Image (tube, helix red, strand yellow):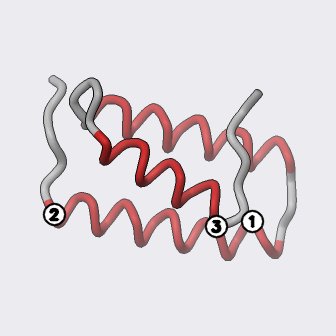
């Protein structure tokens, strides 16, 4: 079911992405980065309503932390 994330869920997801960013900086594996980026995108797409700016915000934050979206 598609719906908005609670504040706790958003905070938990942000913490997870932050921790993953430290792992990726120490282990720059392109396949791992692509896999994690795809998984995070899929999770965010499922929990945010279409057109919801929250998805774009979290995805942008993920990319700013040093990850690049899949081509």
- Quickly name the residue at label 2: 7
Query: At 78% from the left edge and 72% from the top edge, which residue is drawn?
Result: 25
Q: Nearer the viewer, mark 3 or mark 1?
A: 3
As helix, strand or loop, the secondary structure at mark 1 comes to: helix
In the displayed structure, does residue 71 sit left or right of residue 59? Answer: right
- Quickly name the residue at label 3: 65
As helix, strand or loop, the secondary structure at mark 2 comes to: helix
In the displayed structure, does residue 42 sit left or right of residue 8? Answer: right
Q: Nearer the viewer, residue 55 or 28?
A: 55
Query: At 29% from the left edge and 28% from the top edge, which residue is drawn?
Result: 51
User: Distance of mark 3 from mark 1, alpha carbons?
Assistant: 10 Å
Q: Quadrant of the C terminus?
A: top right
In the displayed structure, does residue 16 sit left or right of residue 26? Answer: left
Q: How far across and down, in percent of the image, does residue 54 sit?
A: 31, 47
Q: How far across and down, in percent of the image, does residue 20 sit?
A: 60, 66
Say the numbered circle drawn on residue 24.
1
């Amino acid at each position: 079911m598609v719906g908005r994330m609670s504040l706790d869920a958003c905070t938990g997801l942000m913490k997870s992405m932050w921790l993953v960013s430290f792992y990726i900086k120490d282990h720059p594996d392109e396949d791992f980065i692509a896999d994690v980026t795809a998984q995070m995108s899929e999770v965010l797409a499922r929990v945010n309503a279409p057109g919801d700016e929250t998805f774009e915000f979290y995805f942008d934050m993920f990319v700013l932390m040093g990850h690049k979206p899949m081509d």
